[in-house]
């Protein structure tokens, strides 16, 4: 029965283009990990009628040993595998680290950070975040005489040269990494929060010496030098509730004061300027290539039901009940002719912890409205495999007025191809665009055997799957 269902959904997805993410650790060194499993997975996705796959390409893998020494070999192998499978490829240029699976920043960058810890973001306690570079050093020559922007540009140009045979044909999309987990945000939430635990407000990340210097300059320019001495003194720490202090208090909190507006405007403007620099770089390097450029914006939906929206503020989005903060983000993407990747489309309000006052649905609608206003295309993404009613919620969001023209399902692996998930995904693919099935799409006896073998192969996969 499964093989008949599988065969029935060999289709062309004309309205919404579907992609599936490959494993985060698809490549290490110059070698492809899980080669046979990935090859089998590509065949299965092709049979389903997906447009293609997404491949994370890590700065820490490619430029691991020394600045300017690139090893693209493993990723080139996968690009060729995708081409032979008849699929398209979206690549994500990851200028951040991954904690699980463990993929650090380049070794030579970490070596610099051992003596110059201010190349990283720091929290109020002075603890550095080594998952990406601080945006405050974007244009400072802190990497062996070069600025991070120069290093990122060299990386992009090397990628363009190495993959010239694929760009515009097999490779149709390039996502520019913008911060922690590749997203445009500050690392305001560190570590993994448990799903049954009320999340904290997060913590402002403005305490490395370069961020503090920028804050001091801005305060002096505004005639308020005392406001530039540091971040808000009455804001809670990472795991503390917004009510633990007075900054995020719904009525009369400091976020609504003149100081609050000063700080939050500066904090968010620094993030948007950082995104603008990186997307402008990508648009320039790939301007003569037939590819779409993307950047990822997080869905910080915890505490969205409050007036102050603490999780969004600490992440760098000055969006509150009285201010539409995502319009300036959408305008920046539009200015660079880039599209937004928006995760969390599998999340629904009814499955959130009530105590967190979370509302992924209303936040998603807000961001969608801002993107529609500025003509910014959105590519959807899920947060996890197996969210309650997740596939149903994805379909609802993908067919909504504001969204979308593509969706990237994160990500293939043992859980993705498991018997409790894969048949549901097959059904989801078929229903998403409500295709008309023709006799030519129905499997022959020989084709059924192939599909059955393919599904059995996938059910035995042991790829280590993680969300990006």
Image (cartoon, rainbow, N blue to C red):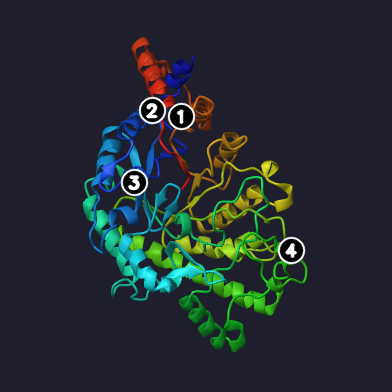
Q: Residues within 10 Å of mark 3 (few under 14, many from 20)?
A: some
Indicate which disc, 4 or 1, sits on the residue closer to the N terminus. 4
| Residue under pointer 2 | 44
In contact (CB < 8 Å): disc 3 and disc 4: no
**Label placed on residue 417:** 1
**How dense is the environment of label 4, judged by Cα within 10 Å: few (below 14), some, or many (20 and up)?**
some
Q: CA distance from mark 1 to mark 2?
A: 10 Å
| Residue with the mark numbered 3 | 172
Q: Earlier in the sequence, mark 3 or mark 4?
A: 3
User: Is 320 situated left or right of 26 in this image?
Assistant: right
Q: Quadrant of residue 293?
A: bottom left
* Circle nearer the N terminus (3, 2): 2
Earlier residue among tags 2 and 4:
2
Labels 1 & 2 near each other (Cβ < 8 A): yes
Mark nearer the viewer, 3 or 2: 2
Of discs 1 and 3, which sits in the foreground?
1
Location of residue 290 with respect to 124 vertically, above or below: above
């Amino acid at each position: 029965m499964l093989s008949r269902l599988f065969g029935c959904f060999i289709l062309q997805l004309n309205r919404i283009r579907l992609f599936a993410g490959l494993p985060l650790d698809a490549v290490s060194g110059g070698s492809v990990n899980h080669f046979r499993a990935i090859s089998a997975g590509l065949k299965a996705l092709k049979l389903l009628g997906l447009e293609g796959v997404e491949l994370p390409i890590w700065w820490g893998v490619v430029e691991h040993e020394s600045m300017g020494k690139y090893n693209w070999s493993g990723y080139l192998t996968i690009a060729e595998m995708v081409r032979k499978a008849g699929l398209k490829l979206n690549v994500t240029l990851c200028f951040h680290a991954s904690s699980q699976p463990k993929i650090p920043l380049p070794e030579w960058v970490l070596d610099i950070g051992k003596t110059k810890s201010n190349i990283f973001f720091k929290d109020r306690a002075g603890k550095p975040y080594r998952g990406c570079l601080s945006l405050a050093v974007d244009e400072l020559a802190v990497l062996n005489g070069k600025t991070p922007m120069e290093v990122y540009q060299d990386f992009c140009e090397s990628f363009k040269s190495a993959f010239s045979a694929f760009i515009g044909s097999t490779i149709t999309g390039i996502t520019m990494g913008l911060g922690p987990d590749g997203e445009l945000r500050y690392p305001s939430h560190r570590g993994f929060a448990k799903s049954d635990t009320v999340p904290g407000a997060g913590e402002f990340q403005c305490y490395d010496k370069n961020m503090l210097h920028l804050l001091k300059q801005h305060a002096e320019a505004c005639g308020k030098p005392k406001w530039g001495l540091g971040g808000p003194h009455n804001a809670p720490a990472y795991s503390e509730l917004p009510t633990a202090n007075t900054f995020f208090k719904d009525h009369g909190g400091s976020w609504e004061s003149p100081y609050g507006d000063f700080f939050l405007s500066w904090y968010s403007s620094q993030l948007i300027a950082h995104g603008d620099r990186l997307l402008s770089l990508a648009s320039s390097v790939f301007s003569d290539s037939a590819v779409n450029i993307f950047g990822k914006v997080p869905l910080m939906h915890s505490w969205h039901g409050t007036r102050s929206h603490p999780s969004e503020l600490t992440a760098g989005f000055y969006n509150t009940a009285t201010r539409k903060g995502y319009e300036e983000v959408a305008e920046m993407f539009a200015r660079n002719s880039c599209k937004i990747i928006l995760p969390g489309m599998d999340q629904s309000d009814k499955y959130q912890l009530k105590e967190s006052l979370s509302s992924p649905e209303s936040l998603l609608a807000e961001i969608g409205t801002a993107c529609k206003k500025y003509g910014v295309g959105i590519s959807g993404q899920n947060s996890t495999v197996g969210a309650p009613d997740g596939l149903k919620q994805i379909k609802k969001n993908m067919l909504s007025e504001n969204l979308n023209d593509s969706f990237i399902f994160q990500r293939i692996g043992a859980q993705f191809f498991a018997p409790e998930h894969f048949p549901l995904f097959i059904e989801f693919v078929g229903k998403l665009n409500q295709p008309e099935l023709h006799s030519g799409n129905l499997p022959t006896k020989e084709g059924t055997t192939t599909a059955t073998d393919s599904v059995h192969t996938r059910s035995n996969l042991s790829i280590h799957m993680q969300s990006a």
